[in-house]
Image (cartoon, rainbow, N blue to C red):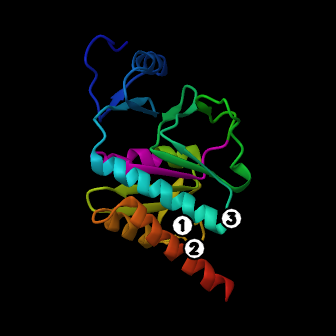
């Protein structure tokens, strides 16, 4: 068993039994830590969230929710929520969305979302400031196995989004969302770039104009 009194390494995968993992995260309830468990390994992320990470986090949530609102797509977004397959997998993505008929699939009052009982989210988003390679690697495999339909990694350093469609425990790069048809990844990247030079409310106004123009062009097709 891992000695809980010692300082656990963070931002790396450690071979750990599920029982030890559960005990560790119970002892960390008062810490601002994200935890993951996959194929017998655990990972803790306890680094302070940077200004850039927090800002991009808000921009992405606003953009996705705004697009869903304009298009009339039922959507429920979740911020740093725990998804668990007991004894097998555990994760706390920065952002997740349930869409359409799944938007109300998780009852109010639910704590940890147990994926033995409830479906996996349609979209998972990780905001990567210091964890980019892991988000593109092991975590991508984790979300493939969980049955997530689409996965985005926001590269904070370069204001880029690496987006994947997922199916049959595999994934492929996409330039337009498949769970939000018509939402180009390039528009979101431009919003991130603009957020470096203007306020989020100004970025929001720009996004609103972009999405409304696109909606108007579709209506006239």
> Where's residue 73, x and y in %?
67, 62
Nearer the observer, 212 or 162: 212
Viewport quadrant of the N terminus: top left
Taking 174 as reference, is 106 left or right? right
Q: Which residue is drawn at 57% across and 65% down?
A: 67
Q: Give the range drawn in magenta.
A: 119-141
Distance (Cα) linking label 1 and label 3: 16 Å
- Assess whether mark 2 and mark 1 are in contact (beta carbons under 8 angstroms): yes
* Residue at the limit of the structure toward the right, as seen here: 101
Judging by the rendered image, the residue that carries numbered circle 1 is: 177
Q: Residue at x 65, y 68 (%)?
A: 71
Q: Is residue 168 in view?
A: yes
Distance (Cα) linking label 3 and label 2: 13 Å
Residue 182: mark: 2
Which quadrant of the structure image shows residue 166? bottom right
Mark 1: secondary structure:
loop
Taking 86 as reference, is 42 left or right? left
User: Foreground mark, 1 or 3?
Assistant: 3
Closer to the N terminus: mark 1 or mark 3? Answer: 3
Judging by the rendered image, the residue that carries numbered circle 3 is: 72
């Amino acid at each position: 068993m891992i000695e809980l009194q010692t300082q656990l390494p963070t931002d790396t995968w450690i071979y750990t039994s599920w029982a030890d993992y559960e005990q560790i995260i119970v002892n960390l309830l008062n810490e601002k830590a994200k935890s993951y468990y996959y194929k017998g390994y655990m990972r803790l992320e306890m680094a302070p969230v940077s200004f850039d990470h927090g800002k991009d986090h808000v921009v992405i949530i606003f953009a996705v929710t705004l697009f869903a609102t304009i298009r009339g797509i039922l959507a429920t977004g979740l911020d740093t929520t725990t998804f668990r397959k007991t004894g097998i997998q555990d994760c706390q993505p920065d952002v997740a969305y349930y869409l359409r008929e799944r938007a109300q699939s998780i009852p109010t009052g639910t704590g940890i979302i147990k994926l033995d009982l409830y479906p996996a989210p349609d979209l998972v988003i990780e905001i990567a400031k210091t964890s980019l390679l892991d988000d593109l690697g092991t975590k991508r495999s984790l979300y493939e196995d969980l049955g997530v339909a689409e996965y985005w990694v926001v590269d904070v350093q370069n204001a880029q989004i690496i987006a994947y469609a997922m199916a049959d425990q595999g994934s492929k790069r996409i330039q337009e969302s498949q769970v939000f048809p018509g939402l180009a990844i390039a528009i979101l990247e431009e919003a991130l770039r603009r957020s470096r030079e203007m306020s989020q409310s100004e970025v929001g106004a720009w996004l609103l104009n972009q999405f409304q123009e696109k909606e108007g062009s579709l209506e006239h097709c």
